[in-house]
Image (cartoon, rainbow, N blue to C red):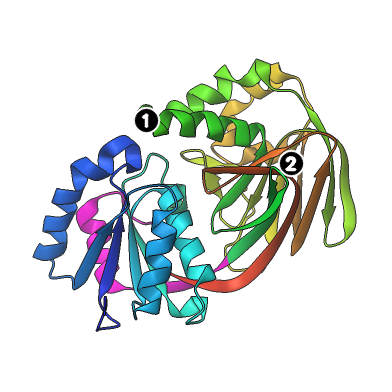
Amino acid sequence: MLNESTEKWLMIVNPNAGVKKGTKDWPKILRILRDEKVDFDFKLTANRGHATRLAAESIVKGCRNICVVGGDGTLNEVLNGVMVQPDVETSGVTLAMIPVGTGNDWCRMFDIPFDYLKAVRLLKRKQTFLQDAGKVTYYHKDDQVNRYFMNVAGMGYDALVAKKTNMLKEKGLGGPLTYMYFVFASLFQYKFIEAVIEVDGKMAFRGEIFSMNVGICKYNGGGMMQVPYAIPDDGLLDVTLIKKTSKWMVVRYARKLFDGSLVDLPMVATFKGENIRIRSTGKVFLETDGESLGHTPFTFEILPKSIRIVTGK
């Protein structure tokens, strides 16, 4: 058995998180865990998707506490392992995080410290919260695929920037400012796409879009507050849509991405709902929790209070 005690933590460690920061900092985190007398096992991820398999397999073997030592993408993989395993209710597994990624946006929502010692002590305190999860159905080539997320999904320009950022990460390059670099560097190659958006079965928007986010939490892109109205346990998906606009306007108001005030701009619309459907004339691409995925059509649904997490709030 991997975990004979349901109190023991499994640390799923991504050595590549934070552009190899996981490799550099894991020995330090390991010492802190031992000094703080945390009862734990650990597994290192070897490739993309490995964290999903590790999480699902560990739950089958009796593990009920999983801590991600990585970034938002690793957390997303672990979440998907929790959601697809058949043995226990998803809320019966507790998820925690020691952030070593480049963005760490989910942690911002729940006051998870970036300081390793403080994060470990928070883990020991084990104050938990039931948050919503999202499920999105999309297409990869001609195949329909499902993916779960617990922070923010991005489409259109947001997905393009995430894809370029992830390509650099896969080469071991980039850093915390890489996302912001591509926000501006990719701006004039992007083409607007016409889309139809339905919220809970009712038409919400038809027209050309620049970017769109569907959020359970508020932050993505390394501290941007693109979904400022999101409440992680209200049973609703929050949508922020940036309609077709002058690209110079995007540059002018970029600072508003960080304080949530972009929603006050006339080219921005917000919606709330349990189900979101998006169709488009061309392919609109998708990322969830920073992980680049497939393309339209999309169907989003909310899974209320389905994930138990360790919170700093």
Quadrant in the picture for the C terminus: bottom left
Report the side of 233 relative to 118 (left or right): right
Determine whether the residue tagged by mark 1 lies in a helix, strand or loop. Answer: loop
Checking the image for residue 241, the label placed there is 2
Q: Which residues are magenta?
A: 111-132
Name the amino acid type tagged 2. Leu
Q: Residue at x 35, y 68 (%)?
A: 66
Position of residue 294 in the picture relative to residue 93 (left or right): right
> Is residue 205 within the magenta segment?
no
Q: Residue at x 51, y 38 (%)?
A: 221
Please give left or right for residue 199 compared with residue 47 in the image.
right
Give 309 or 84, whichever is nearer the viewer. Answer: 84
Horizontally, is 222 left or right of 230 in the view? left
Residue 226 visible in rendering: yes
Whether residue 311 can be seen here: no
Q: Return the residue at label 1.
A: 175
* Residue 94 vertical placement versus 221 (above, below): below
Q: Nearer the viewer, residue 146 or 160?
A: 146
Relative to 265, residue 277 above or below: below
Of mark 1 and mark 2, the one earlier in the sequence is: 1
Q: Residue furthest front?
A: 142
**Image depth: mark 1 or mark 2 in front:** 1
